[in-house]
Image (cartoon, rainbow, N blue to C red):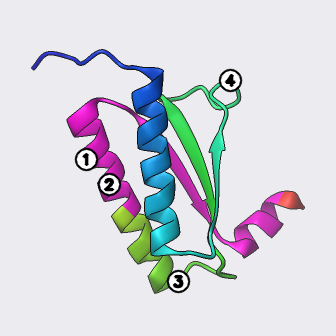
């Protein structure tokens, strides 16, 4: 299989698609695209703060759907987009 050439505009389009997908799954989530210069692994990285205090069954469902879509994007387009899904308690624990 021949590798496709990556473009910044296609990556940005895919990032926006993933962000919209996450917001559709959980409208109250906070979705942030991390600048590449800060997080250098992969082609891009998205941080998601889910509006739950702890990890729930719903958070598992969201994670499964998001990671499935990211795998599809990697297989179809060749872009490695990472996502960090966290809950409110996880953010508080990190801040301490």
Residue 79's image quarter?
top left
Side of 20 where 6 appears, left or right: left
The secondary structure type at the circle numbered 2 is helix
Q: Tell me how far mark 1 sits from mark 3, CA to CA.
A: 24 Å
Residue 1 vertical placement versus 10 (above, below): above
Q: Tag 3 or tag 4, which sits nearer the N-term?
A: 4
Q: Which mark is residue 69?
A: 2
Residue 26 vertical placement versus 43 (above, below): below
Q: Tag 1 or tag 4, which sits nearer the N-term?
A: 4
Quadrant for the C terminus, please.
bottom right
Q: Tag 4 or tag 2, which sits nearer the N-term?
A: 4
Q: Which mark is residue 72?
A: 1
Q: Which mark is residue 31?
A: none
Residue 45's image quarter?
top right
**Residue 59 in picture, x, y percent from top left:** 50, 76
- What are the residue bounds of the magenta stretch? 66-94
Residue receiving disc 3: 56
Residue receiving disc 4: 37
The secondary structure type at the circle numbered 4 is loop
């Amino acid at each position: 299989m021949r590798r496709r050439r990556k473009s910044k505009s296609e990556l940005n389009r895919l990032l926006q698609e993933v962000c919209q997908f996450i917001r559709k799954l959980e409208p109250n989530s906070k979705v942030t695209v991390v600048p590449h210069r800060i997080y250098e692994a992969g082609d891009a990285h998205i941080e998601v703060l889910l509006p739950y205090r702890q990890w729930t069954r719903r958070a598992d469902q969201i994670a499964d759907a998001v990671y499935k879509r990211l795998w599809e994007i990697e297989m179809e387009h060749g872009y490695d987009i990472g996502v960090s899904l966290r809950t409110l308690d996880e953010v508080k624990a990190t801040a301490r």
